[in-house]
Image (tube, grey):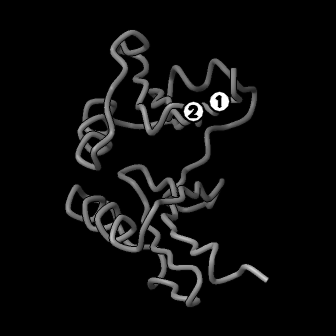
Amino acid sequence: MSTQIFVNLPVTDLDASKRFYTALGYSVNEEFTDENASCIVISDTIYVMLLTEAFAQRFTTKAIADATTTTEVINALSTDSRAEVDRLADAALAAGASPVVEPQDEGFMYSRSFADLDGHQWEVLFMDASATAG
């Protein structure tokens, strides 16, 4: 079994967050979804667990960060093309996300970033491995 990652994100409105992530083309795993949490399937090995803030608090003794005022983490997802970077970022913005920084074009790498409905920062990138090959 390959290593999987479950990114746990506290959210203020679980239903709105589910709509946001499905608008990006991701699916909900209903087996791990209830009134406290929802499992968003990004890929075969990447999942986002949307947790109501009260439920998320059960897993930590620290305060839940307000991601609209603090950068707690930047989640970066790679894509297979520049067009997919644009599709995901445009879909996120159309679904209510906010842009974070201007698109970055380094020639071999292209990325765009956005903050989701709760301020969690995402970067979507494409890296052309052939451009960096020695």
The secondary structure type at the circle numbered 2 is loop
Point 26% across, 30% down: residue? 15
Q: Is residue 82 left or right of residue 95?
A: right
> Between residues 27 and 58, which one lies in front from this camera angle?
27
Q: Is residue 9 depicted above or below 30 in this figure?
A: below
Point 74% across, 34% down: residue? 62
Residue 103 is situated, as x and y percent measured from the top left of the image, at 45, 83
Q: Is residue 112 depicted above or below 41 in this figure?
A: below
Tell me the residue that label 2 is attached to: 45
Residue type, mark 2 in image: Thr
Q: Of all residues shown, which one is farthest toward the right?
A: 134
Q: Is residue 17 left or right of residue 106?
A: left
> Between residues 128 and 100, which one lies in front from this camera angle?
128
Residue 16 is situated, as x and y percent measured from the top left of the image, at 25, 38
Q: Is residue 62 left or right of residue 78?
A: right
Pointer 1 and pointer 2: residues touching (CB < 8 Å)?
A: yes
Distance, label 1 to label 2, CA atoms, is: 4 Å
Mark 2 packing: few (<14 Cα in 10 Å), some, or many (20+)? few
Q: Is residue 18 depicted above or below 110 in this figure?
A: above
Point 70% across, 81% down: residue? 132
Based on the displayed image, in which of its 4 quarters is residue 133 positioned?
bottom right
Residue type, mark 1 in image: Gln
Tell me the residue that label 1 is attached to: 4
| Quadrant of the drawing holding the N terminus | top right
Point 51% across, 70% down: residue? 126
